[in-house]
Amino acid sequence: MPVEILTSSHRAEWERFPEEIDDAALTAFFCFADDELEAIAEHRSAHGRFAIAVAVGTLRWLGFVPGALDELPEPAAALIASQLDVELASIQPARLNAERDARAEHLTHAMRVSAACARTMTSTSCGRRSQNAPSGMTARSR
């Protein structure tokens, strides 16, 4: 018989973004390499590119992608927008919570970007050299 490990309220908390992100995690997980940005840029819309970038960084940070992308801490959202050369104010939060088919497409693209870039050492758009952490590695603190 299955045993419930988390209460429904604890589960809901763990399925969301933490409310804050520290500078070390922000830099480690949301500064994208040039080749990652090129792969993200292949998506057709600004909202799609933003959602894919959120998914790439979040996979590295948390090891999963919460359903409500619009709950990403603002410093991470601002850093992503600056790297994508998009005005954060132009991103409509409701459009980030994509329909099921679009979400699956974004996650598939994010996993391809993460897998392809995890093997290379490249310059990040944040001005440092970094070896990308493999997806699934987390620095989650609650």
Image (cartoon, grey):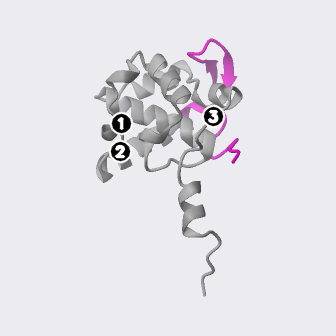
Of helix, strand and loop, which mostly describes the magenta segment? loop
Specify whether residue 7 is in view: yes
Q: Is residue 63 left or right of residue 38?
A: right
Q: Residue at x 46, y 32 (%)?
A: 53
Look at mark 3 in the image and give the residue it sits on.
21
Labelled disc at residue 97:
2
Question: Callout 1: 10 Å neighbours few (<14), some, many (20+)?
Answer: some
Q: Residue at x 38, y 18 (%)?
A: 86
The span from disc 3 to disc 1 (Cα, nearest Å) is 19 Å
The span from disc 1 to disc 2 (Cα, nearest Å) is 7 Å
Residue type, numbered disc 1: Pro
Farthest top residue in view? 127
Q: Position of residue 9 (x, y in %)?
A: 56, 64
Residue type, numbered disc 3: Ile
The span from disc 3 to disc 2 (Cα, nearest Å) is 21 Å
Q: Residue at x 32, y 23 (%)?
A: 90
Magenta span: 114-142
Badge 1 marks a residue whose secondary structure is: helix
Look at mark 1 in the image and give the residue it sits on.
93
Q: Residue at x 61, y 45 (%)?
A: 62
Badge 3 marks a residue whose secondary structure is: loop
Q: Is residue 11 left or right of residue 138?
A: left
